[in-house]
Image: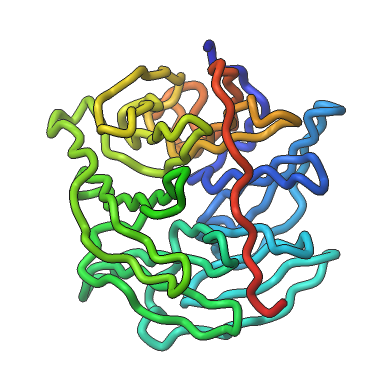
Amino acid sequence: MEPELIADYQCVTGEGPLWHPDEKCLYWLDIPRGRIFRFDPATGTHEQVFEGDQIGGFTIQANGGLLLFMARGAVKIWRNGALTTVIEELPDERATRFNDVIADPVGRVFCGTMRTPERLGRLYRLDPDGRITKLLDGIGTSNGMGFTPDRKRMYYTDTPRREIYLFDYDRDTGAITNQRVFVHTPEDPAEGRPDGMTVDAEGYVWSARWDGGCLVRYAPDGTEDRRIRFPARKVSCPTFGGPDYGDLYVTTAGGDKKDENGPGAGALFRVRPGVRGVPEFRSRVGI
């Protein structure tokens, strides 16, 4: 399970990797620079395909486009090289940006925002018809999410609080209720804090550790199963991909300060952990 270096664009905040099953490629971000990258494992080639405003996260649309969640609460569709605006801005989010997002089984998107100097972050839900609803307030940093295999519960990460929560999830309405703590990570600074996450085919949670230099796999009961170390302090997000979803792609951050954050800081890595993931759900916003 030694991490394999795939591409190093020295990302300030490499994030949000997603496997695109139509293209059989992996996409990922550099959030503050608004850059999108693409890796084709069949040829081993990678490239930057977009640069613009800050992008905190994205989903893959049912028609193959990318739904971008950006600065000021903007939401746009990037398809065939063109941008289409879904939401120009959210007045309450003009001073901040989206951070991490995930599509649900119906095509809605749960989308979190960063805190501002005046208040903490939030979690919203964007419905396919374009309506957006605030679900949670008072969030330190809205981060990684995932669904249990039965699609009845949803994981949600608040990084500064060092906690991954579990909610009951209603597929029919998109409501999340009954919040409880799934994992509280150690207070030791060397352990870092939980960041992005994904759920594998066995229902185990893979959680990246910002400033912890590792990826941790948790059993469904919250006990640690294993961890994988990386040559980068700021491990930001994992996702499964490849033809059989047996490849685990992991983004890292801090590439602008490699002397502090490690030689692999800001790079994209691949691990073959011996377990498979499942395809992420696709958004259906505006479709």
Q: In the visual, does 134 lie left or right of 282?
A: left
In the orientation shown, which residue stands out farthest toward the left? 187
Residue depicted at x 52% and y 12%: 1
Residue depicted at x 31% and y 58%: 168
Q: In the visual, does 25 lie left or right of 276?
A: right
Residue depicted at x 64% and y 54%: 35
Instruction: Looking at the picture, tell me which residue is in the foreground, 27 or 11.
Output: 27
Q: In the visual, does 162 lie left or right of 200?
A: left
What percent of the width, then of the height, locates residue 179? 21, 58
Q: Considering only vertical position in the picture, is 263 above or below 29?
A: above
Task: Classify residue 259 by image quadrant.
Answer: top left
Q: Considering only vertical position in the picture, is 240 above or below 13?
A: above
- Coloring scheme used: rainbow
Could you tell me which quadrant the C terminus lies in?
bottom right
The number of callouts visible is 0
Instruction: Looking at the picture, tell me which residue is in the foreground, 126 or 180.
Output: 180
In the orientation shown, which residue stands out farthest toward the bottom? 91
Q: Considering only vertical position in the picture, is 154 above or below 242?
A: below
What percent of the width, then of the height, locates residue 41? 78, 29
Task: Classify residue 103 by image quadrant.
Answer: bottom right
Instruction: Looking at the picture, tell me which residue is in the foreground, 168 or 164.
Output: 168
In the orientation shown, which residue stands out farthest toward the top? 2
Residue depicted at x 26% and y 50%: 165
What percent of the width, then of the height, locates residue 216? 36, 26
What percent of the width, then of the height, locates residue 97? 44, 68
Q: Considering only vertical position in the picture, is 114 above or below 191?
A: below
Instruction: Looking at the picture, tell me which residue is in the foreground, 251 or 244.
Output: 244
